[in-house]
């Protein structure tokens, strides 16, 4: 995600070690935060435990502010930070499918692996289902290839798409996050009784 290879900071082989260490640390943090438990994750959709929203928005805002200020003071060249190309319609459909799976199963791909690694059966079933879905997608890909590559937009970031400055996007996302935190606190108090019943 960062230009380590361009500047020769370390080799491809060493990058695998770095990725392994970061992955273990990330998985440990998810588990310690309760994100290996489907009940906590699914509670998001019933509004009595908004931990996922709070953690994810905190991570997004922290990373965004870091990128913005490092770029502003000249420590980071944003053009060297990797961003995936946009295929608008396929990615919208993919996001909806992921969301449906999240609501039904209580996990996203990352949290299902964390759950499985701690011995939870539902996490194992979810991972097996995910692998089966990958296999099926690979088998039917020739039929979906046209849609998969449709609505290509290249590397598009929000400031470019909406024609506003990077700083304005940062301000709006921070404002939206503060509103989401306030709404999350309200929802947890409003639906606290439902949470106690579910638990």
Image (cartoon, helix red, strand yellow):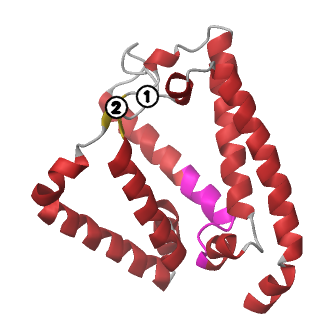
Question: Percent x, y for residue 136?
Answer: 20, 69
Secondary structure at numbered mark 1: loop
| Up/down of 13 relative to 182, above or below | above
- Mark 1, Cα crowd under 10 Å, few <14 / some 14-19 / many 20+, is some
Quarter assignment of residue 97: bottom left
What residue is at 64 percent from the left and 79 percent from the top?
Answer: 39
Q: How many numbered dots are placed on residues in this image?
A: 2
- Horizontal arrangement in the rendering, residue 59 relative to residue 18 (left or right): right
- Horizontal arrangement in the rendering, residue 9 relative to residue 151 (left or right): right
What residue is at 70 percent from the left and 76 percent from the top?
Answer: 46
Question: Percent x, y for residue 179?
Answer: 81, 48
What residue is at 54 percent from the left and 74 percent from the top?
Answer: 103
Residue at image mark 2:
153
- Horizontal arrangement in the rendering, residue 64 relative to residue 132 (left or right): right
Secondary structure at numbered mark 2: strand
Quarter assignment of residue 141: bottom left
- Horizontal arrangement in the rendering, residue 9 relative to residue 137 (left or right): right
Question: Percent x, y for residue 36?
Answer: 59, 70
Question: Does residue 106 appear in this view?
Answer: no
Circles 2 and 1 in contact, beta carbons < 8 Å = yes
> Is residue 127 covered in magenta?
no
Question: Percent x, y for residue 118?
Answer: 53, 74
Q: Distance between the residues labelled 2 and 1?
A: 7 Å
Q: Give the range drawn in magenta.
A: 25-38
Q: In which quarter of the image is the N terminus?
A: top left
> Is residue 33 covered in magenta?
yes
What residue is at 50 percent from the left and 78 percent from the top?
Answer: 104
Question: Does residue 49 appear in this view?
Answer: yes
Of residues 197 and 113, the one drawn nearer to the viewer in this rendering = 197
Residue at image mark 1:
156
């Amino acid at each position: 995600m960062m230009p380590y290879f361009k500047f020769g900071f370390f080799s491809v082989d060493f990058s695998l070690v770095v990725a392994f260490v970061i992955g273990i640390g990330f998985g440990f943090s998810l588990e310690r935060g309760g994100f290996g438990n489907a009940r906590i994750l699914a509670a998001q959709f019933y509004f009595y435990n908004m931990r996922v929203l709070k953690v994810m928005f905190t991570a997004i805002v922290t990373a965004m502010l870091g990128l913005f200020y490092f770029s502003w003071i000249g420590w980071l060249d944003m053009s060297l930070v990797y961003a995936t190309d946009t295929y608008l319609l396929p990615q919208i459909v993919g996001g909806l499918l992921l969301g449906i799976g999240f609501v039904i199963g209580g996990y996203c791909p990352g949290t299902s692996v964390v759950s499985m690694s701690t011995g939870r059966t539902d996490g194992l079933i979810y991972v097996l289902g995910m692998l089966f879905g990958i296999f099926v997608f690979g088998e039917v890909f020739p039929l979906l290839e046209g849609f998969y590559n449709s609505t290509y937009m290249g590397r598009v970031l929000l400031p470019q798409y909406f024609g506003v400055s990077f700083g304005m996007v940062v301000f709006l996302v921070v404002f939206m996050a503060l509103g989401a935190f306030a709404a999350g606190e309200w929802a947890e108090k409003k639906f606290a009784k439902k949470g106690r019943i579910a638990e």
